[in-house]
Image (cartoon, grey):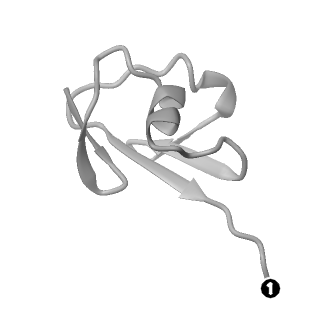
Amino acid sequence: MNIILNGEKFSIDKKTSIKDILIQNNIGEKNIVVEVNKEIISKTFWDQITFEENDQIEIITAVGGG
């Protein structure tokens, strides 16, 4: 199945979770926001979300500074 991950096509298994995507892409869980189809997903649901073909996932990293 294909999804759009940060603007690029990405193939996943239907049972893939947000946590699986983070692990596959070497992205740590700290200081990030995950959005699925323009809806922010709480970290408590990262194992429960299921994806459909062409879902759009954005992973945004918070950067501190001033």
Which of the 4 image quadrants contains residue 13?
top left
Point 76% across, 71% down: residue: 64
Residue found at the very far right of the displayed protein: 66
Q: Is residue 14 above or below residue 11?
A: above
Residue 22 point in image, percent of width and height: 51, 38
Residue 41 point in image, percent of width and height: 57, 36
Q: In the rendered image, which quarter contains the C terminus?
A: bottom right
- Within 10 Å of disc 1 (Cα), the crowding (few <14, some 14-19, many 20+) is few
Which of the 4 image quadrants contains residue 12?
top left
Point 48% across, 27% down: residue: 20
Which of the 4 image quadrants contains residue 57?
top left
Q: Which residue is mark 1?
A: 66
Residue 15 point in image, percent of width and height: 36, 14
Tag 1: amino acid: Gly
Q: Is residue 50 above or below residue 10?
A: above
- 23 or 47: nearer the viewer: 23
Secondary structure under the numbered disc 1 in the rendered image: loop
Q: In the rendered image, which quarter contains the N terminus?
A: top left
